[in-house]
């Protein structure tokens, strides 16, 4: 079974790209915090590339923005000889950076 579930912050604004005038995709990077602190006392972060297709790509670019927290369920896919990406099958919006800052006041 090839299944991945990630929760993290969007590193950049999502942007839809058209392929061959029809197919729509969005390539995002998700900053996922590790569950332990490093020797400096901070949590390390992994930047994980994800590809979103069709309606998932469109919805993500319409409703999610840089620094928003999202959940991604998908599968790993090998690109080239070394690189692995996550191909998203479902994206869930979890929190907005702006809303969290307002809630803390």
Image (cartoon, grey):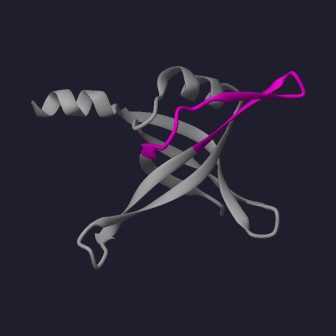
Q: Is residue 3 above or below residue 70?
A: below
Q: Most extreme residue toward the front, as rendered?
A: 40
Q: Is residue 97 left or right of residue 68?
A: left
Q: Position of residue 98 (x, y in %)?
A: 29, 28
Q: Is residue 58 above or below residue 67?
A: above
Residue drawn where x is 43% and y is 55% of the image: 32
Q: Is residue 7 above or below residue 94?
A: below
Query: Is the N terminus in the top left, top right, bottom left or bottom right quadrant?
Result: bottom right
Check if residue 94 falls in the magenta segment: no
Q: Position of residue 65 (x, y in %)?
A: 46, 29
Give the quarter of the image for residue 33: bottom left
Q: Is residue 83 left or right of residue 67?
A: right
Q: Is residue 24 left or right of residue 88?
A: right
Residue drawn where x is 45% and y is 34% of the image: 66
Q: Position of residue 42 (x, y in %)?
A: 27, 66
From the image, give the main secondary structure of the stretch colored magenta: strand
Range of magenta residues = 9-28
Residue drawn where x is 9% and y is 30% of the image: 105
Residue drawn where x is 47% and y is 35% of the image: 92
| Viewer-closest of 54 and 21 | 21
Check if residue 12 falls in the magenta segment: yes
| Viewer-closest of 40 and 25 | 40
Give the quarter of the image for residue 95: top left
What is the total number of numbered labels drawn onto the structure image? 0
Give the quarter of the image for residue 16: top right
Q: Most extreme residue toward the left, as rendered?
A: 105
């Amino acid at each position: 079974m090839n299944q991945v579930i990630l929760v993290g912050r969007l590193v950049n604004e999502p942007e839809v790209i058209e392929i061959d005038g029809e197919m729509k995709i969005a390539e995002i990077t998700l900053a996922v915090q590790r569950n332990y602190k490093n020797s400096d006392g901070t949590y390390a972060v992994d930047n994980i590339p994800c590809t979103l297709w069709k309606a998932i790509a469109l919805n993500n670019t319409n409703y999610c923005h840089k620094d928003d927290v999202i959940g991604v369920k998908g599968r790993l896919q090998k690109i080239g000889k070394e690189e692995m990406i996550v191909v998203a099958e479902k994206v869930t919006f979890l929190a907005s950076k702006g809303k969290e800052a307002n809630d803390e006041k």
